[in-house]
Image (spheres, helix red, strand yellow):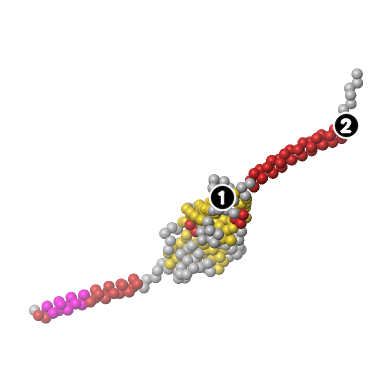
Amino acid sequence: MCWLLRLRLLLLLLLLRLSVCLEEREGEEGSGAEEQPHFLHDQLTLNVSVQLGSTAHLHCRLAGITEQSVSWYRKTGDEIQLITFDFQTYHNDDRFALNFEQPNDWRLRIRFVQRRDEGSYQCQVSTHPPLIRTIHLQVVEASIQILDERGVELREKFYREGSTIELQCLVADVPTATALQLAWYHHQHRLNYDDPRGGVSLKTELRGSVARSWLRVTQAGRRDSGIYYCNVTNLAAASVTIHVVPDEYPAAIQRATSVSANSVTLLVAVLTTVLASLTAAILPTAPSPHR
């Protein structure tokens, strides 16, 4: 009986050891399995808006790439145009290039984006079937305006000495306003709240596709006359000409305008009289009817 019990215990130990060995082997095989290529994006179809003239980066993050090729195509209807294949660019426009970013972003770079660049772009991996990520590119053009305190667009404005210059810079139709930086300049001098002049205040608001910046310059003097710029990073600038004049100067401008208008009226009357006289002298006089 003792030897039978010992035999059963030995068999049980062998079975336990065999089970542990099988589990270890399965674990080793699982850890050695190759990772399959896949995108590291939640969305395989994406709409992207970029600013006209800026640089666009279309992202394609991948994992598990070994011997597979990665390509970028542009799709227009049924027509497919190859842009890049692995690290080589096959597009005849040098604005397009693969700009790989470590560790896994096969991003397509488009410099100086133009209207004609709008369309669908595909990042494709040479698996079976192929992996495809599609990006629909939209090109937008921002509008930049400088407005006064009433919201009227300005090109030129007069302020009395001692008054407050109030300007608003409005930037609309941008892909992401929060990525913008707005700055005010008086000629080549950048204005800020700690400007040595004093009395300068700024406020900027970035929301959605709209950015606004307000500039206030108190106790305006003649030195504050000149050109003011609202500069938007990577976009453009809008400008306005400001004249700071004494209190009596606006009345003088009004009188000069009235005199100028009267002079124009007088000149038009003289020219009309001269033209009538010339016409009468040149055209033949109609013959008198015979009785």
From the top left corner, tell me how far across and down residue 56 is, in percent.
53, 60
Which quarter of the picture shows residue 23?
Answer: bottom left
Q: Is disc 2 in contact with disc 1, using a CB cutoff of under 8 Å? A: no
Q: Is residue 282 left or right of residue 170?
A: right
Placement of 118 over or under 279, stated as above or below: below
Image location of residue 161, percent across then percent down: 59, 51
Residue pictured at 57% horizontal, 51% vertical: 162
Q: 263 above or below 212?
A: above
Quarter that holds the C terminus: top right
Q: Residue 6 colored magenta?
A: yes
Q: Give the farthest residue toward the top.
A: 291
* Residue occupying the point 53% across, 56% down: 199
- Secondary structure under tag 2 reads loop
- Which amino acid type corresponds to the residue marked 1 in the rendered image? Ser
* Magenta part of the chain: 4-16
Residue 284 shows which numbered tag?
Answer: 2
On whether residue 121 falls in the magenta region, the answer is: no
Residue depicted at x 88% and y 31%: 284
Q: Earlier in the sequence, mark 2 or mark 1?
A: 1
Residue 45 in view (yes/no): yes
Q: Amino acid at mark 2?
A: Pro
- Mark 1 — residue? 163
